[in-house]
Image (tube, rainbow, N blue to C red):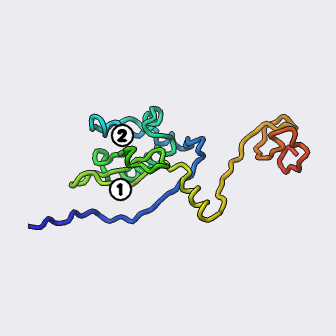
């Protein structure tokens, strides 16, 4: 007797690429998800006792289990969304990719998986891909895709703190340059 194919509901896919400062991967809204306790299946558990763990996302980031706040923030938002659409807490987990599964350029990867009658099925992937995608796109298109961030610095000429990216505010030897910032 032939075995019928297993059927999985078809989902349309969406993708978010959220770019972050590689030197500061904290997220301004992380506190809104830091106390959530989704089931996590980290690498150590997969290779060890095979048991899921249930720390808060804040604890998981603080311990280094999840690489950074930005990754954990989007995992938390995914967890809330999946619960809102009816996925029960005990039928949902985030499984960390083993090093052998991760792309060479990835820092950390977690899949949201839903427990189905046939076992755990991946439904959402979360990856800290560092700057790989941007670097490849810039190389292929020969288009510079850089972001900058205004920082508050001490103004050399006035001794005050100004929001500026002006080199005149950053070093005294540049004072002779034309400057359009508030300290000019």
Question: Disc 2 versus disc 1: distance between alpha carbons?
Answer: 19 Å
Which residue, given by chain and number where applicable, does mark 1 sit on?
123
Q: Position of residue 13 (x, y in %)?
A: 41, 63
Q: Position of residue 131 (x, y in %)?
A: 56, 51
Judge whether 44 appears above or below 122 on screen. above
What residue is rendered at 65% in x and 62% in y? 143
Label 2 or label 1, whichever lies nearer to me, is 2
What residue is rendered at 16% in x and 66% in y? 4
Judge whether 61 appears above or below 73 on screen. above
Return the disc, 2 or 1, that comes first in the chain's sequence. 2
Q: Is label 2 in a helix, a strand or a loop? A: helix
Q: 139 and 151: which one is in front?
A: 139
Q: Residues within 10 Å of mark 2 (few under 14, many from 20)?
A: some
In the picture provided, is 90 more to the left or to the right than 145?
left
Q: 134 and 6: which one is in front?
A: 134
The circle on residue 43 is: 2
């Amino acid at each position: 007797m032939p075995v019928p194919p297993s059927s999985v509901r078809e989902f349309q896919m969406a993708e978010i690429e959220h770019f972050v400062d590689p030197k500061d991967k904290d997220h301004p809204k992380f506190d809104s998800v830091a106390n959530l306790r989704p089931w996590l299946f980290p690498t150590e558990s997969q290779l060890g006792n095979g048991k899921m763990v249930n720390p808060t996302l804040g604890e998981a980031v603080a311990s280094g289990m999840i690489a950074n706040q930005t990754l954990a923030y989007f995992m938390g938002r995914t967890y809330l969304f999946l619960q809102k659409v009816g996925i029960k807490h005990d039928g949902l987990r985030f499984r960390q990719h083993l090093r052998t599964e991760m792309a060479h350029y990835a820092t950390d990867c977690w899949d949201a998986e839903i427990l189905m009658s046939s076992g755990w099925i991946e439904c959402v992937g979360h990856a800290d891909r560092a700057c790989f995608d941007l670097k490849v796109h810039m190389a292929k298109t020969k288009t510079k895709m850089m972001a900058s961030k205004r920082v508050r610095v001490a103004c050399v000429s006035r001794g005050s703190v100004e929001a500026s990216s002006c080199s005149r505010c950053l070093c005294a030897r540049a004072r002779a340059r034309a400057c359009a910032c508030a300290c000019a």
